[in-house]
């Protein structure tokens, strides 16, 4: 399997030298030396302000920060120092820089940083005056207003490569003020805050960027609804409204708020209404360090106020729930002590499951059984162990598949008995029921799951699986499209389900396009690709994929069906279709590709 560099959210600073070509004409060698010296000095300033200068590209430099305030401070400090430095030079070869700062997702590998965040920072930098700094609107809203910076709103700009206009601010030091002292980036230490076992979060009142009292009510309503919807996630501990609203209108840093409320994460944001449009920005911050975990901007037309409020709340709650869970898994995967608490063992098991190997699942099973020994009344441990046993059955990693499936069912029922308000457990039981062809029971369980948490990506994904199984593939496609709008970072298993929905509905080319786009296709995905290619008439390509499937399956599958179609029908763990015609369509594609009765 090809490993892809991990993505992360970061504050990116991009700078270049103004008029470098004209300077080169004066003296190429001296210009090169002075540009290099400029970037060396700027890199030192960046380092002192908690940043990392990743690379120098000719007459440009790219750096990464965890906080927008550090990036702005570093830029303004260097611009002032560079002006003084240049005034002392004896000639006209004086490198002047301009700086753009943005928040975005990036990939960092081999000290090279790439991604949308870099492109946005570069586009912004082109809008800066020589010796100036500009900042993206979303980044501007994360900078504490207690800092001595003055901002000039440059309005919204259409930038190449970006669908939505970007608000831009020019930033300068306030007259008569001094560069702020560097605030150290502190890393959270286990146990220092006495934090609860579950990932914990406080939603601060979203700031209304208007004097209109009506907008203030709208901002408060958005905040209250987000608190309510996040509370549906059983894996999160959400601070109550009255505690969070105690900080309304107060200029207190997130670390202090995190300590006072005893939470790991802070969600903050702002609301701006202009005419018939509303813009909401939200950012998730790790309280102990001040590092940004995630940030997003939402732009909507204000045709129906309550409908747009529901839309925004659902999108924010769905995304934040997943981001906090992912951050918690990354933390747990680094734990080494065998005496870690039951909850951390569950998180560690989740990180192992993400590796998607037989060995990792065996280790995850061990962690979860250990968690149950430590805390026999912990529903999450039973639920996760049920997921592990189901997947071991599903991909033939179990020597006794029927026992694994039966245990998965028993464990899920135990989890539900311990906590009947967990929507994910209801959804998982739906999945188990439909693989027993108990579609009425599955309908009951997925209905309960959706009532308990209609924002959970996993619940909605399983609902899509259920819709495909009962013959509602087009409805499933619509659901997956909506889900992609709510949370653009789509898990691979949901992408695969969307392709299956297209194939089941006879839209083979759409299914093929999606399945080919998967970065690390499993044999499960290859099976659906074979059927889609064959049913679309692309037989030669289908046969090539089949040969690839067989070569991998012979090594990995406990039950290897070879080229016998009857054995495939017994071994295949695809969709348990309610309608026989849907099943026949899939296996007819495999027969066309070369399997024999």
Image (spheres, rainbow, N blue to C red):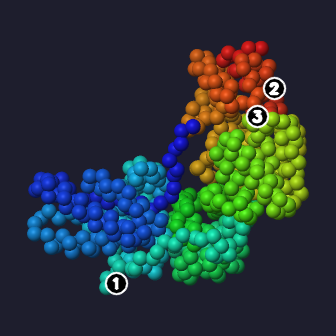
Q: Residues within 10 Å of mark 1 (few under 14, many from 20)?
A: few
Residue farthest toward the front in the current orientation of the protein: 338
At horizontal 30% and vertical 52% (from top left) the residue drawn is 57
Dot 3 lies on which element? loop
Q: Report the side of 221 relative to 396 (left or right).
A: left
Quadrant for the C terminus, please. Answer: top right
At horizontal 40% and vertical 62% (from top left) the residue drawn is 52
Where is residue 522? Give x, y as percent.
Answer: 64, 34
Q: Report the side of 310 relative to 150 (left or right).
A: right
At horizontal 79% and vertical 24% (from top left) the residue drawn is 569
Say the numbered circle drawn on residue 570.
2
Q: Residues within 10 Å of mark 2 (few under 14, many from 20)?
A: few
Q: Residue 571, relative to residue 295: is it above or below? A: above
Where is residue 536? Give x, y as percent.
Answer: 63, 21
Identify residue for label 1. 177
Q: In the image, which is nearer the foreground, mark 1 or mark 2?
A: 2
Dot 1 lies on which element? loop
Going from N to C along the chain, the mark reached first, 2 or 3, is 3
């Amino acid at each position: 399997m090809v490993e892809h560099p991990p993505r992360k959210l970061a504050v990116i600073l991009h700078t270049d030298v103004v008029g470098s070509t004209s300077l080169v004409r004066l003296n190429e060698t001296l210009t090169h030396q002075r540009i290099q010296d400029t970037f060396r000095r700027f890199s030192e300033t960046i380092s002192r302000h908690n940043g990392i200068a990743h690379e120098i590209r000719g007459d440009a430099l790219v750096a990464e920060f965890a906080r927008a305030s550090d990036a702005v401070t570093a830029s303004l400090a260097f611009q002032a120092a560079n002006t003084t430095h240049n005034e002392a030079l004896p000639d006209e070869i004086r490198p002047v820089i301009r700086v753009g700062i943005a928040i975005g997702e990036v990939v960092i590998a081999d000290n090279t940083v790439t991604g949308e965040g870099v492109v946005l920072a570069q586009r912004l930098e082109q809008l800066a005056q020589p010796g100036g700094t500009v900042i993206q609107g979303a980044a501007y809203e994360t900078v504490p207003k207690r800092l001595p910076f003055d901002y000039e709103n440059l309005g919204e700009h259409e930038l190449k490569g970006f669908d939505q206009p970007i608000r831009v601010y020019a930033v300068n030091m306030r007259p008569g003020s001094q560069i702020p002292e560097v605030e150290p980036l502190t890393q959270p230490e286990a146990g220092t805050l006495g934090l609860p076992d579950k990932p914990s979060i406080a939603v601060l009142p979203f700031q209304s960027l208007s004097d209109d009292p009506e907008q203030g009510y709208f901002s408060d309503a958005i905040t209250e609804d987000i608190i309510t919807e996040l509370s549906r996630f059983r894996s999160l501990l959400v601070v109550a409204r009255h505690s969070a609203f105690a900080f309304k209108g107060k200029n207190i840093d997130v670390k202090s708020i995190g300590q006072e409320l005893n939470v790991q994460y802070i969600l903050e944001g702002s609301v701006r209404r202009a005419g018939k449009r509303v813009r909401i920005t939200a950012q998730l911050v790790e309280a102990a360090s001040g590092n940004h975990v995630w940030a997003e901007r939402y732009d909507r037309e204000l045709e129906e106020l309550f409908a747009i409020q529901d839309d925004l709340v659902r999108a924010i709650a769905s995304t934040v729930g997943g981001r906090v869970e992912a951050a918690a898994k990354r933390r747990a995967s680094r734990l080494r002590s065998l005496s870690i608490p039951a909850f951390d063992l569950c998180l560690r098991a989740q990180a192992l499951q993400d590796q998607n190997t037989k060995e990792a699942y065996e280790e995850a099973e061990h962690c979860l059984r250990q968690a149950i020994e430590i805390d026999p009344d912990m529903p999450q441990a039973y639920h996760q162990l049920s997921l592990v046993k189901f997947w071991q059955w599903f991909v033939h990693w179990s020597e006794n598949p029927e026992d694994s499936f039966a245990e998965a069912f028993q464990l899920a029922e135990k989890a539900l008995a311990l906590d009947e308000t967990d929507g994910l457990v209801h959804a998982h039981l739906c999945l188990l029921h439909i693989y027993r062809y108990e579609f009425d029971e599955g309908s009951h369980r997925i209905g309960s799951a959706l009532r308990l948490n209609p924002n959970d990506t996993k619940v909605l994904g399983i609902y899509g699986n259920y819709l495909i199984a009962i013959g509602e593939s087009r409805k499933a496609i619509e659901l997956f499209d909506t889900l992609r709008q709510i949370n653009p970072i789509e898990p691979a298993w949901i992408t695969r389900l969307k392709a299956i929905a297209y194939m089941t509905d006879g839209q083979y080319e759409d299914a093929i396009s999606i399945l080919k786009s998967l970065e690390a296709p499993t044999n499960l995905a290859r099976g659906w690709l074979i059927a889609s290619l064959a049913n679309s008439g692309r037989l030669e390509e289908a046969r090539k994929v089949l040969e690839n499937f067989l070569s991998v399956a012979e090594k990995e599958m406990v039950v290897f069906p070879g080229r016998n179609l009857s054995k495939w029908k017994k071994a295949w763990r695809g969709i348990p279709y309610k309608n026989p015609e849907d099943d026949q369509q899939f296996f007819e594609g495999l027969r066309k590709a070369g399997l024999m009765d």
